Image (cartoon, grey):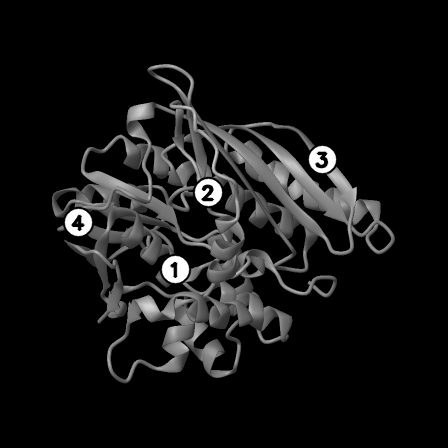
């Protein structure tokens, strides 16, 4: 972490600046088989191959969020594969993205990063089939991840429907914990908790895509819970309400916030989209920092019918996501989609 100016998904460009940068992209005719592109900030692109197969393609990489090179590789790979799962896809292969300060990191250290990433891909049942490497000023690692999905089973961030409930698969707090780690305030039990969360593959995604009651999915990463819930709201043209008391948070995170471990990315996130978020009176600044906390390898956010909620929760729990919770609901369609917290 000492070789990087930031870490994990906290390195992401702020949402407002990213929108400004993408606004200048030239408009091109899109092929009809491109089912998902850049229009709605989805987690991955999807291209139809035939009536029963579509390719899910994504890339994700970042600077170290932890000091241990093997753990860094594991977290980065898990985070990259999450985008495939969030679209309802099953990963089929990965390519490594490697940028390392060769003069400051030993070959053995770099090899451990690659081994960590490869171990996660092996757990997902896929090979690291290639990649690209450069000599860089700061250590960067991630994956290009490819998956497969039935074209009719793609789950986008645009499908939420009025009356749906929202279910979050992982607790919040990885950004705060990484900030505490940088300050030397994160004990070993908390580090293990963070590692367990950030290296848990979001494997329920493809099975959720088979459920007719699941209408939309995304994963909560660098823009925080508020930012990614807003993407769901804007994609579907609806209002979304979060029941803040029901949002799962990792043990000890609120204590770390009181010790000043909020990330700079949390503030940048709020500056980017806070005008579209309605908070209850007296909502603490530390709670707002948690609402916008950048999650590295965060949980799936699922929009489904109330009738499907128990099946979604049961599948989460069966695959190791014991903290999965219903955290809100989808409201009426609106011309100016918004997020409300109660």
> Of the residues tagged 1 and 4, which is closer to the observer?
1
What residue is disc 1 on?
227
Name the mark on residue 182: none
Q: Quadrant of residue 253?
A: bottom left
Q: Quadrant of residue 114?
A: top right
Q: Earlier in the sequence, mark 1 or mark 4?
A: 4
> Of the residues tagged 3 and 2, which is closer to the observer?
3
What residue is disc 4 on?
164
What residue is disc 3 on?
132
Q: Position of residue 23 (x, y in %)?
A: 48, 50
Name the one closer to the observer, 246 or 144: 144
Q: Position of residue 287 (x, y in %)?
A: 37, 76
What residue is disc 2 on?
82
Callout 3–callout 4 Cβ contact below 8 Å? no
> Of the residues tagged 4 and 2, which is closer to the observer?
4
- How far apart, in angstroms, are the residues tagged by discs 4 and 2? 23 Å
Describe the element under mark 1 as helix, strand or loop: helix
Q: Identify the residue shown where x is 66% and y is 46%.
A: 141
Q: Position of residue 22 (x, y in %)?
A: 51, 49
Q: Identify the residue shown where x is 27% and y is 56%.
A: 325
Describe the element under mark 2 as helix, strand or loop: helix
- Mark 2 neighbour density, 10 Å: few (under 14) some (14–19) many (20 or more): many
Describe the element under mark 3 as helix, strand or loop: strand
Callout 3–callout 2 Cβ contact below 8 Å? no
Quadrant occupied by the N terminus? bottom right
Q: Earlier in the sequence, mark 1 or mark 2?
A: 2
- How far apart, in angstroms, are the residues tagged by discs 3 and 2? 21 Å
- In this rendering, the answer to whether 14 lies above or below 319 is below
Judged left or right of residue 139, residue 286 is: left
């Amino acid at each position: 972490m000492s070789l990087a100016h930031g870490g994990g998904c906290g390195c992401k460009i702020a949402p407002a600046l990213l929108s400004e940068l993408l606004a200048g992209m030239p408009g091109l005719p899109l092929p009809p088989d491109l089912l998902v592109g850049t229009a709605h900030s989805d987690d991955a692109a999807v291209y139809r191959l035939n009536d029963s197969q579509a390719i899910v393609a994504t890339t994700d990489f970042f600077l170290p969020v932890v000091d241990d090179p093997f753990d860094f590789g594991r977290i980065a790979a898990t985070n990259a594969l999450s985008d495939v799962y969030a679209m309802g896809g099953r990963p089929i292969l990965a390519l490594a993205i490697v940028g390392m300060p060769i003069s400051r990191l030993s070959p053995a250290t770099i090899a451990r990063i690659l081994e960590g990433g490869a171990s996660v891909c092996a757990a997902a049942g896929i090979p690291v089939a290639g990649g690209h490497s450069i000599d860089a000023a700061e250590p960067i690692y991630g994956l290009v991840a490819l998956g497969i999905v039935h074209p009719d089973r793609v789950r986008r961030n645009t499908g939420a429907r009025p009356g749906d409930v929202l279910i979050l698969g992982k607790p919040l707090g990885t950004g705060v914990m990484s900030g505490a780690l940088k300050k030397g305030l994160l004990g070993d039990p908390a580090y293990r908790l963070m590692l367990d969360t950030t290296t848990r593959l979001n494997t329920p995604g493809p099975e959720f895509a088979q459920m007719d009651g699941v209408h939309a999915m995304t994963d909560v990463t660098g823009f925080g819970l508020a930012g990614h819930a807003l993407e769901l709201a804007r994609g579907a043209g609806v209002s979304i309400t979060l029941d803040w008391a029901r949002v799962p948070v990792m043990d000890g995170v609120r204590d770390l916030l009181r010790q000043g471990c909020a990330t700079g990315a949390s503030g940048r996130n709020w500056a980017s989209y806070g005008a579209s978020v309605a908070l209850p009176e007296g909502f603490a600044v530390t709670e707002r920092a948690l609402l916008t906390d950048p999650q590295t390898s965060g949980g799936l956010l699922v929009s489904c019918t109330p009738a499907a909620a128990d099946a979604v929760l049961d599948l989460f729990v069966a695959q190791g996501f014991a903290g999965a919770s219903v955290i809100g609901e989808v409201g009426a369609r609106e011309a100016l989609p918004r997020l409300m917290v109660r």
